[in-house]
Image: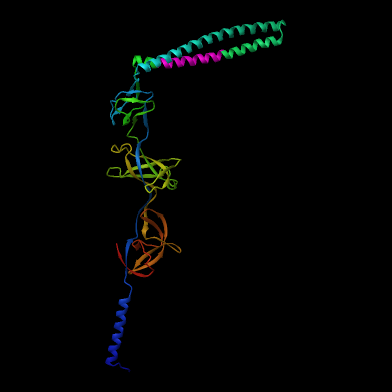
């Protein structure tokens, strides 16, 4: 039996120790990674966007005529009944020159009306004479006393005068309306009659566009009235996302100022998109989604900002993996699973995806630990040190 001398044993031990030391020195150190755990739980696929609240039926009351607005006694939030006077307009005062001009225009309109009446009277007399002549020629033609041509001329003359009489009557009516319009300016100035504007429905004053007394022109908005208990949520999203939303989808209204989210349901998707400039200066095509609240929230008023989550699909229990752990491989989606301190690449089959989690259909088990945010340095079988 061969025996090793003490010197050889020491040399062999030194070689093995040196080789072990070199292996430990040059061995790659474990790569620190972030990790997550595959677990079961509910999954919700949502579209998140900002929106605002608004009253469903909003009535904007505008000035029907130009005039001096009397100071409105109502305040925002006051209750008004249907038919109540919410605003009053007085005629604008005319100075001496304007009053003379209005009087002259009324006198000219009156003269034109008298002239039209005279023309109408003359046209009626001419028409009556032509009708009598037409009847007389008709009798003579039937007896053979006049020619057919003379009879037709008399009949045509009566038809022409009838049309002229109709035209003169229309001109007379126009002249009468013009006179009444000019005279109304003077009558209103003299009488000082006001125009009272009534509430079309019962509700609350949502906004006062004009409260103080001043001269307004016709069409200027004065008061907004509506029912604040009938609130809907308007959410604008990208048109490419809007095609995924359907009436009946559940909506969670958050960050509205209250403690808990409000439940709503999509009522309609507007058929037309509009262009909106994003915060980055990019033109976007967006679509308004209208959602109705399931219950009345008295603290939520008109035009409040909200954050809404439109639920597209949801499952009560699924096997979930963090979305940040997924990456594309040669055969589809893959993840790095941490096994015995090493990162092992595994293919997975993914179902529904939300912003933070994805549904695992195959490839992982409940409790598996995966690498999240895998870097390019990480390879299959590499030793890792994970932190949660």
In this rendering, the answer to whether 148 lies above or below 16 is: above
Of residue 296 and residue 152, the one placed in the foreground of this image is: 152
Which image quadrant is residue 69 in?
top left
Residue 83: x, y in percent?
Answer: 34, 23
Quarter of the C terminus within the rendering: bottom left
Of residue 16 and residue 4, the one placed in the foreground of this image is: 16
**Residue 28 seen in the figure:** yes
Answer with left or right where residue 380 lies relative to residue 114.
Answer: left
Residue 231: x, y in percent?
Answer: 34, 37
Which image quadrant is residue 16 in?
bottom left
Coloration of the structure image = rainbow
Which image quadrant is residue 155 in?
top right
* Numbered label tally: 0
**Residue 84 seen in the figure:** no
In this rendering, the answer to whether 135 lies above or below 352 is: above
Quarter of the N terminus within the rendering: bottom left
> Would you say the magenta stretch is mainly helix, strand or loop?
helix
Q: Magenta stretch containing residue 180, yes or no?
A: yes
Residue 94: x, y in percent?
Answer: 35, 18
Q: Which span is picked out in magenta?
A: 165-184
Of residue 149 and residue 254, the one placed in the foreground of this image is: 149
Q: Residue furthest bottom?
A: 1
Q: Residue furthest front?
A: 97
Residue 106: x, y in percent?
Answer: 42, 14
Q: Magenta stretch containing residue 111, yes or no?
A: no
């Amino acid at each position: 039996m061969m025996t090793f001398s003490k010197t050889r044993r020491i040399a062999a031990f030194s070689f093995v120790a040196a080789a072990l030391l070199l292996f430990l020195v040059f061995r790659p150190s474990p790569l620190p990674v972030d990790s997550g755990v595959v677990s079961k739980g509910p999954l919700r696929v949502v579209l998140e966007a900002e929106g605002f609240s608004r009253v469903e039926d909003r009535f904007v009351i505008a000035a029907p005529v130009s005039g001096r607005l009397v100071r409105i006694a109502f305040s925002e939030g006051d209750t008004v009944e249907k038919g109540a006077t919410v605003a009053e307009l007085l005629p604008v005062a005319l100075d001496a020159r304007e009053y003379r001009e209005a009087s002259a225009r009324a006198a000219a309109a009156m003269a034109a009306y008298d002239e039209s009446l005279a023309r109408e009277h003359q046209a009626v007399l001419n028409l009556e004479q032509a009708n009598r002549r037409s009847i007389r020629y008709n009798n003579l033609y039937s007896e053979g006393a006049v020619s057919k041509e003379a009879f037709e001329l008399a009949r045509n003359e009566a038809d022409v005068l009838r049309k002229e009489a109709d035209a003169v009557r229309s001109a007379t009516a126009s002249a009468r309306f013009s006179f009444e319009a000019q005279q109304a300016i003077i009558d209103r100035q003299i009488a000082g009659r006001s125009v009272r504007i009534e509430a079309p429905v019962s509700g609350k004053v949502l906004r006062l566009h004009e409260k103080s007394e001043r001269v307004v022109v016709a069409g200027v908005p004065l008061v907004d009235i509506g029912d604040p208990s009938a609130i809907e949520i308007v959410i604008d999203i990208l048109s490419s996302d809007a095609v995924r939303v359907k009436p009946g989808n559940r909506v969670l209204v958050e960050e509205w100022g209250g403690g808990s989210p409000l439940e709503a349901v999509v009522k309609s998707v507007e058929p037309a998109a509009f262009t909106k400039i994003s915060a980055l200066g990019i033109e976007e095509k967006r679509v308004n989604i209208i959602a109705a609240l399931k219950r009345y929230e008295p603290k939520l008023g008109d035009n409040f900002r909200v954050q809404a989550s439109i639920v597209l699909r949801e499952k009560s229990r699924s096997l979930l993996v963090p979305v940040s752990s997924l990456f594309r491989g040669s055969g589809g989606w893959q993840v790095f699973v941490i096994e015995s301190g090493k990162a092992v690449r595994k293919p997975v089959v993914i179902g529904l995806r939300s912003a933070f989690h994805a549904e695992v259909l195959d490839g992982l088990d409940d409790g598996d630990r995966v690498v999240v945010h895998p870097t390019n340095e990480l390879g299959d079988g590499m030793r890792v040190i994970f932190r949660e």
